[in-house]
Amino acid sequence: MSIKHSTRVTICGEDYTIRSDSPPEHTRAVAAYVDAKINEVLESAAVVESHKAAILAALQITDELFAARSGQEEVAESMRVLSGELRRWLPPAKRQV
């Protein structure tokens, strides 16, 4: 059974209590990142409403996530190719591993 942590955070001037399996310091770091992204949108655009800024920030964060996943897939494919090439250098008895 996982332990639920209740962590108090502030995002865009609003206080929230987040219940999560994650350690409180992780939850605070995530909340701080979201808060920073929303503030970034509020400062750089003509967006005044915080809910619209939150949506734009969510889009930016999701774009970052997709880019990271894509990069991770590219690294995994490179590792598979490299592994196949290295396997050819192994003695036949060791290639099955």
Image (cartoon, rainbow, N blue to C red):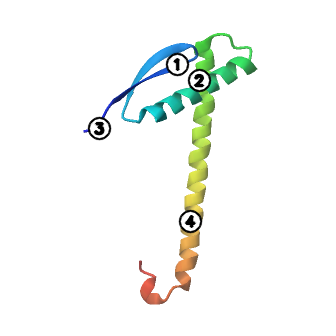
Residue drawn at (63%, 18%), measured in percent from left and top? 53
Crowd band around label 1 with a 10 angstrom C-alpha radius: few (<14), some (14–19), many (20+): some
Residue drawn at (47%, 34%), measured in percent from left and top? 25
- Kind of residue at badge 1: Thr
Find disc 3 in the rendering and name its residue.
Answer: 2
Of 44 and 56, the residue lying toward us: 44
Secondary structure under the numbered disc 2 in the rendered image: helix
Find disc 4 in the rendering and name its residue.
Answer: 79
Relative image position of residue 78 (x, y in whole percent): 60, 64
Which quadrant: the C terminus? Answer: bottom left
**Which is nearer the N-term, disc 4 or disc 3?**
3
84 shown above or below 20? below
Relative image position of residue 66 (x, y in whole percent): 58, 41
Do tag 1 and tag 2 residues touch (Cβ < 8 Å)? yes
**Alpha-carbon distance for marks 4 and 3?**
34 Å
- Kind of residue at badge 3: Ser
Q: Is residue 90 left or right of residue 41?
A: left
- Kind of residue at badge 4: Met
**Which is nearer the N-term, disc 1 or disc 2?**
1
Secondary structure under the numbered disc 1 in the rendered image: strand
Find disc 1 in the rendering and name its residue.
Answer: 10
**Alpha-carbon distance for marks 1 and 3?**
25 Å
**Which is nearer the N-term, disc 1 or disc 4?**
1
Find disc 2 in the rendering and name its residue.
Answer: 35
- Kind of residue at badge 2: Asp
Residue drawn at (49%, 89%), measured in percent from left and top? 91
Relative image position of residue 2 (x, y in whole percent): 29, 38
